[in-house]
Image (spheres, helix red, strand yellow):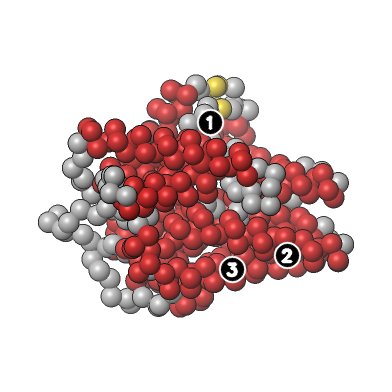
Amino acid sequence: MVQLDIYGTLVAASLVLLTGRLLVGRIAVLKTYTIPEPVAGGLLVALALLAAHATTGFQMRFDTGLQAPMMLTFFACIGLNADLASLRHGGRRLLVLLGVVLGLLAMQNLLGMGLAKLLGLDPLIGLLAGSITLSGGHGTGAAWGAVFAERYGLASMTELAMACATFGLVLGGLLGGPVARYLTSGLRLPGQRGAGDASPTAFEAPDTVRLITAPAMIETLALIACCLMGGHAIAGALKGTAFELPVFVCTLFVGVILRNGLAALGLYQVFERAVSVLGNVALALFLAMALMSLRLWELSALALPMLVILLSQAALMAAYAIFVTFRVMGHNYDAAVVAAGHCGFGLGATPTAIANMQAVTDRFGPSQVAFLIVPMVGAFFIDIANALVIKGFLLVVDLIR
């Protein structure tokens, strides 16, 4: 057993990102299917650790102290980049995508519960392997796993939820690129951003050079710190109430309020270049840490019925992105990027969705529409919608158990 401290973990995450960049640049299949660099590097390390554990029993544990702050920093940057005036322009598309997402939430739960019943499992296990862990992620899975254990007396629900969410995180990062590759064939593509084009101010081109001063970076760090502090305070105040929300949703909400409130009062204009740089750094480090610390041998403990359910959910996500998300969102390049993002947060998490879209836009060209609506739906509205959908399905489960 080797235990890395917080500094060793940061070094390892940085090496994972550099390795991922090298792999995507040199391995044609990774580039062809636009696999995100953190996913490529992180999975390579996770597979290497799996092989070492299987042959020698070797284990390496990473300090996860930075993982949550990196994730929250990313969501704070999404909020600080959310100009409500711009969001109004994407209002109709945002509502359409929300409707598409609601459809997937219902189908994930129907598929999970249906397969669980066919395989002789409790319907609650199928629900746990549905929208709770796949669209909800690790946080939602842990919360509902504890509820199922306490209320229904089911053992090891939290561990099962973590395994399902981890499986979804991996598949969400792997599916987005191939789905986008399939959808963009035959479409008119915008082309890669030229060197003389204006620098983007969002997340769609993480490698673009942005000129930032030290004072602007300090001001942006102060805003992010306020978002993290405010998000924790709001989440703590709402805990245990009917309006309880995850910390990252509250952090994003504080970012939106700060960005638009300060601008409306004429006090400060958020420097979007600095926000996007810090957001991309936090996103890359979070994904690298999350994927390199996967304990894949624990996933192997999943029973065959659970693997059947989860693989079926992955197939559903790919088919839904191709035949529903892509077509409903406009059957064009923007819709293809949105579909890649939907694979990310429909199976994993919003950071995976952003990484999927970045991998696509880095190769084929920018999509401002996708980066306008996907973060807001994937990071904010989906948790509220998912909570309502889950409670509705729980009523059905109580009737059929």
Q: Which mark is residue 392?
A: 2
**Could you say whether the residue bearing mark 3 is in a helix, strand or loop?**
helix
Which residue is pictured at 78% across the width and 49% down the height? 148
Q: Which residue is drawn at 41% across and 35% down?
A: 225
Quadrant in the picture for the N terminus: top right
Distance of label 3 from label 1 (alpha carbons)? 32 Å
Amino acid of disc 3: Leu
Q: In which quarter of the image is residue 57?
A: top right
Is 20 or 48 nearer to us in this picture? Answer: 20
Which percent across, then down, holds residue 60?
55, 27
The circle drawn on residue 76 is none
Query: Vertical placement of 100 versus 388: above or below?
Result: below
Q: Residue furthest front?
A: 265
Q: Is residue 138 among the parts visible in the rendering?
A: no
Q: Which of marks 3 and 1 is nearer the N terminus?
A: 1
Residue identifier under label 1: 64
Point out the tag, 1 or 2, that comes first from the N-terminus: 1
Asked whether residue 191 appears in the rendered view, the answer is yes
Q: Are marks 3 and 1 in contact (CB under 8 Å)?
A: no
Is residue 212 placed above or below 205 in the rendered structure? above
Q: Please tell me whether mark 1 sits on a helix, a strand or a loop.
A: loop
Q: Which amino acid does label 1 sit on?
A: Thr
Residue 102 is tagged as: 3
Q: Where is residue 129 in the image (x, y as percent from the top left)?
A: 68, 56
In the rendered structure, which amino acid carries the disc numbered 2? Answer: Gly
Is 291 rendered above or below residue 28?
Answer: above
Q: Circle 2 sits in a helix, a strand or a loop, which is it?
A: helix
Please give the name of the residue rendered at 21% of the width and 59% of the height, measured from the top-left corner: 193
